Amino acid sequence: MNFDAFVKDITDNNWNVFGAELYLHGQLIRSFGDTEGLHDLYSMTKTVLSVAVGIAYDEGLIDLDASVLSYLPSKYLEKLSESQTAVFREITIRRLLTMSVPGFPFRAEGDDWLEFSLRCPIENVSDKTFNYNNINAYLVGVCLTEALGKDLGAFIEERIFSPLGIENFEYKRSPEGYFYGASGMKLSVHDISKIGLLLQNGGIYNSVRILSEEYVGRATSIQQMNREGGYGFFIWKYRSGFSINGKCKQKCYVLPDKDLVLCYLSYIDDDSHDLVESAEKHILTSESQEEQLRYRSQ
C-alpha cells in the first residue's frame, strides 16, 4: 500500500482531484488536498438516499416490496391512465433501489418531474434487467417523503447528518419541491468518508447505531446483476466490498475484509480509467499486512 505513490500520480498527471482520505481500521491514516470544502457528489447522493430509506425501513415506515402506488400522492394517481396504473403497480421500492425498471430515460424534464416520470412509456415492465437512471432515485425520494409525512431533506439532516457530525452541506430539490435524491448534493471528502465508514461498520458510527446491520448487508451486496459486477441499493459492488460512485470519477471504496476505506472527490469528465487504476495499483489491491500496520503508525 502506497498512498504517497497515489498522490504522486495525481500531482504528476495534473488530475483534477480535490482531495482524498484513506482509513484503516476505522482510523484516518492519510489525506491529500482539500478534504473539508464542499464539492458536488453527483450520484453519490443516491447512497445517502439509500441510508435514509434504510432508517425508514428499520422503523417500519416504508415497505421495500410495496408498489410505488402505495406512496405516491393521490392527485397524481388520479390522472394515471388504466394502462399506466397497471404498469406502476408492478414497480416496487426495491426495484427502484436496484435500478431494475425498464424504459425510464436518464432524467426527468419539465416543470413537474413526477408527472413526467409517471407518463414515461414502459414496455415489458416485468423485465428486471439493469437500467441505470436518475428517475429511479427521484421516485424513491418522492415515495419516502410521502411515507415519512415530512420533508426528506430535514429527515436526512436530523437522522443522518447530525449523528455523523456533518454540519456543512447543500442539496437540491425538484421543481415541485421534493428532495432530489439522484444528484445535487454537496459534501466534503471528509464527510462522504463518514458514509463509507458507517456502511463499513454495519450501520454504526462512533458507537451509535444509525442503520440496521440487516439493511446495510442487503444494500451493499448484489441485488441486481449488471456488467459492472453487481448493484445493491444505490451502491455498487466492488471486488470483495462495495463502492459509492459519482460522475467525474467520484469514489468511496469500502473493503471490509481489509478494513479499508478510500474516498476521493474529483472532476475528471472523460472516459479515462487512469485514476482508478492508480488507486487499485497503489492502495486497493495491496495485500501486505505489514504495510497496513506501518501506514497506521505514521
Image: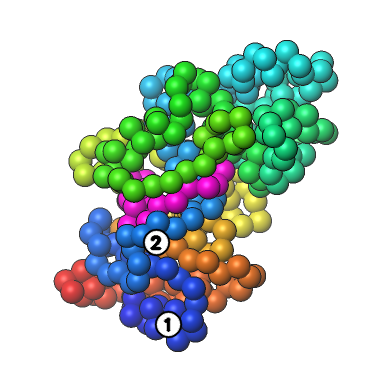
Q: Residue 244 location, x and y as percent?
A: 47, 53
Which badge, 2 or 1, comes first in the chain's sequence?
1
219 with respect to 65 (left or right): left
Q: Position of residue 145 (x, y in %)?
A: 50, 25
The residue tagged 1 is: 11
On screen, 142 above or below 206? above
Q: Which residue is mark 2?
A: 263
* Highlighted magenta segment, given as a residue range: 182-199
Label 2 neighbour load within 10 Å: few <14, some 14-19, many 20+: many
Which one is nearer the viewer's eye here, 166 or 131? Answer: 166
Instruction: Tell whether label 1 touches label 2 (CB within 8 Å).
Output: no
Residue 269 as seen in the image, left or right of residue 63: right
The amino acid marked with disc number 2 is Cys
Select label 2 or label 1 by which is in front. Answer: 1
Q: Of helix, strand and loop, which one carries label 1? A: helix
User: Does the magenta-highlighted stretch encompass residue 184?
Assistant: yes
In the image, taking residue 87 as reference, residue 145 lies left or right, namely: left
Regarding residue 48, the answer to whether it shows in the image is: yes
The count of marks equals 2
The answer to whether residue 96 shows anywhere in this view is no
Tell me what residue is drawn at x 25 percent, y 62 percent.
28
